[in-house]
Amino acid sequence: MQLSVIGCGYLGAVHAAAMASLGHQVVGIDVDEAKIAMLSAGQPPFHEPGFEEILKAGLASGNLTFSTDYTAVESADVHFVGVGTPQRRDGGGADLTYVDAAIDGLVPHAKAGSLIAGKSTVPVGTAARLADIVAPHGIRLAWNPEFLREGFAVKDTVDPDRLVYGVSRETGDEDVATLDAVYSSILERETPRLVTDYATAELVKVAANSFLATKISFINAMAEIAEVTGADVTQLADAIGHDVRIGRKFLNAGAGFGGGCLPKDIRAFVARAEELGKGESVGFLKEVDEINLRRRQHVVDIVVNSFDGQPFGHRVAVLGLAFKPDSDDIRDSPALDVAVRLKGLGAEVVSYDPQAMETARRVHPQLDYAESLDAALAGAEAVVIVTEWKQFRALDPIETAEKVARPVVFDGRNILDPAAWRDAGWTYTGMGR
Ligand code: UGA
């Protein structure tokens, strides 16, 4: 099929290359000329395992092209919209400027009978509003939320655990048939496919992210209680996680969640529910947000306390900047936040991340970035782990002790073996353990 993908960020660029890998003819559109130039040259603008391979393969096969010009969408049967919906500057709601601009860009060029399939995370009610705008032009609209995780974006796109189609009441059968044709090779594997109305599809996405955020904040709340009682939250998570109704996934206590999705999605959901007069229904998400933000400050506090409240001039190695491993994304990153706050308190912070140093440097040029993990550790009076990269997990406590000035470690992601580190002479502090 002929497809267009509007917006070439994490979501759109991966979706475009993944759809080309499934055999479709795809054009990716973005207003950012530098990004389009990079993608056209086979250079990923962000770190995502497996993306470069499918990008290059798509370009080489001729199935994948990129453009800044909307006229390139004219022959497409389906237009995916994967632009960002960041948090508004003036509150918690979602900023729909880019979604509206994508629709404005598409309407004059999309052929009659084509389908716009929204993938961006939007406040409930958006799809119905957009459908009214495009319908007079003979263009159909569906909402097809995306559940990909950064770090697993390619796998999650070509092999998702479910597909959700929010379709129109009028043209629903045709919308389903069109999307089934796009995803035929995925559906052959009996991937669950749920057909809903617009509002349900929009809500599925924010409900899923709200549930995940709530699960993380729940275990972090237990970590707070463990910290004042001497209990171990990782053992607690293992024990409750054996109950299949609860499950062990997303029960890792630590510095909390960040990224371009979970934090802004729960805030946007609260804002939308308040507009609908149902703020109290999701009021608990404000608590989820607060618990989450407290964890970052907790990491800062325990490091500062280790210097008797006087971190000024003390060298602190902050390991991790990305909001999660296998990503160079620093949006709302707890790790970067910890580094910036410690630096603001006068500590001599030296940061290291295997992938996110360039993205972090652009936003926070005032931080010191080490050339290597060893350079970050050299002479450190405290080591703070805030992103669970496998390189940090694999650190040897005996060898690492020889590199630092003071063997004090704060395991902000609970990835080290406390006994092994203590045996090697370290003062070990985990999160809620
Ligand atoms: C999240 C959802 O997991 C995806 O399903 C969704 O499609 C995506 O948002 C989106 O809306 O686009 P992502 O932001 O890539 O994906 O990251 P997650 O893997 O969900 O991790 C989010 C944060 O939670 C990270 O900072 C991670 O370190 C933290 N986390 C995760 C914990 O603190 N504890 C855990 O147990 C799990």
Image: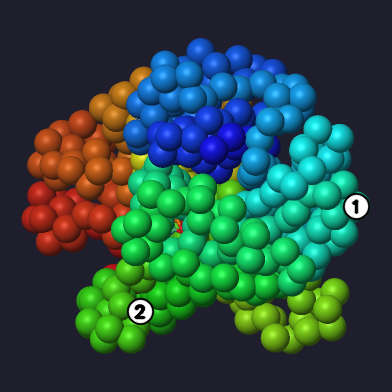
Labels 1 and 2 touching (C-beta < 8 A) = no
Report crowding for label 1: few under 14, some 14 to 19, many 20 or more residues within 10 A (C-alpha).
Answer: few
Q: Residue 85's spot in the image, x, y percent? A: 71, 50
Residue at point 58%, 35% (across, down): 2
First in sequence, mark 1 or 2: give its number.
Answer: 1
Circle 2 sits in a helix, a strand or a loop, which is it?
helix
**Vertical placement of 167 versus 355: above or below?**
below
Residue found 51% across the figure and 71% down from its top: 194
Q: Residue at x 41, y 39 (%)?
A: 22
Residue at x 27%, y 83% (from the top left corner)? 244
Percent of width and height locating residue 10: 54, 39
* 390 displayed left or right of 271: left
Query: How far is disc 1 from disc 2 in space, using C-alphas?
Result: 59 Å
Q: Which residue is mark 2?
A: 226
Position of residue 401 in the picture relative to residue 19 (left or right): left
Mark 1, residue position? 136
Say which amino acid is labelled 2: Ala
- For the question of whether residue 385 can be seen, the reply is no
